């Protein structure tokens, strides 16, 4: 099956959480170039929130529904991320049995193809936008 057009999170900052590389049915790849603003100390360590944001964005795009929201996530930070890294998140829907609650597995890799983060995201596809009245 070919690539699909993005239908969710269309205004997301590419600088803060990444750029979509590919979208396929139930899967997405998103990349993030680390910038100096993400650094927390003199060792050039990147704040984990940016890595989480990348993974969360990849999960949303893998589901690709305009009304998808994150319910919870169970994550592990495996390796530190530093300033020179470029990250790639690979997200795959693992359970979409009822169409409303969707489970997504996400792995984030550095440029050396090492896993730096892994997580399971529990997402919900709502009938309307969470802020719509």
Image (cartoon, rainbow, N blue to C red):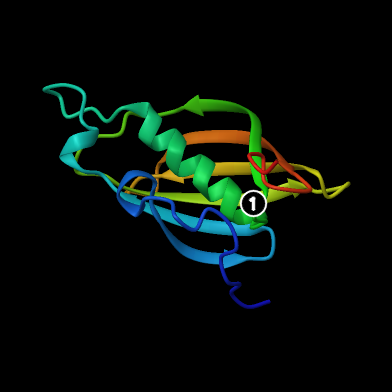
- Mark 1, Cα crowd under 10 Å, few <14 / some 14-19 / many 20+, is many
Give the position of the C terminus as an image quadrant.
Answer: top right
Residue furthest toward the top?
Answer: 41
Q: How many marks?
A: 1
**In the figure, is residue 133 to the left or right of 52?**
right
Question: Vertical placement of 47 versus 24: above or below?
Answer: above
The percent coordinates of residue 22 (x first, y second) are 51, 66
**In the image, what residue occupies the spot 20% across and 38% down?**
83
Name the secondary structure under disc 1: strand
Give the position of the N terminus as an image quadrant.
Answer: bottom right
Mark 1 — residue? 92
The percent coordinates of residue 14 (x first, y second) are 35, 53
Is residue 132 visible in the rendered image? The answer is yes
Residue 39 occupies quadrant: top left
Residue furthest toward the front?
Answer: 133
Question: Vertical placement of 106 versus 10: above or below?
Answer: above
Residue furthest toward the bottom?
Answer: 2
Question: Vertical placement of 26 versus 67: above or below?
Answer: below
Is residue 116 visible in the rendered image? The answer is no
The percent coordinates of residue 112 (x first, y second) are 32, 48
**In the figure, is residue 106 to the left or right of 47?**
right
**In the image, what residue occupies the spot 81% across and 45% down?**
100
**In the figure, is residue 117 to the left or right of 72?**
left
**In the image, what residue occupies the spot 62% across and 58% down?**
27
Residue in the foreground of this view, choosing between 57 and 34? 57
């Amino acid at each position: 099956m070919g690539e699909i057009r993005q239908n969710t999170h269309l205004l997301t900052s590419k600088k803060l959480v990444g750029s979509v590389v590919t979208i396929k049915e139930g899967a997405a790849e998103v990349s993030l170039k680390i910038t100096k603003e993400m650094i927390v100390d003199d060792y050039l360590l990147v704040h984990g929130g940016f890595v989480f944001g990348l993974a969360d964005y990849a999960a949303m795009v893998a589901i690709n529904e305009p009304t998808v929201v994150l319910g919870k996530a169970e994550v592990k930070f495996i390796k530190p991320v530093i300033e020179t890294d470029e990250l790639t998140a690979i997200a795959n829907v693992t359970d979409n049995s009822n169409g409303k609650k969707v489970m997504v597995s996400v792995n984030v890799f550095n440029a050396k193809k090492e896993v730096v983060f892994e997580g399971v995201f529990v997402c919900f596809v709502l009938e309307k936008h969470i802020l719509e009245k």
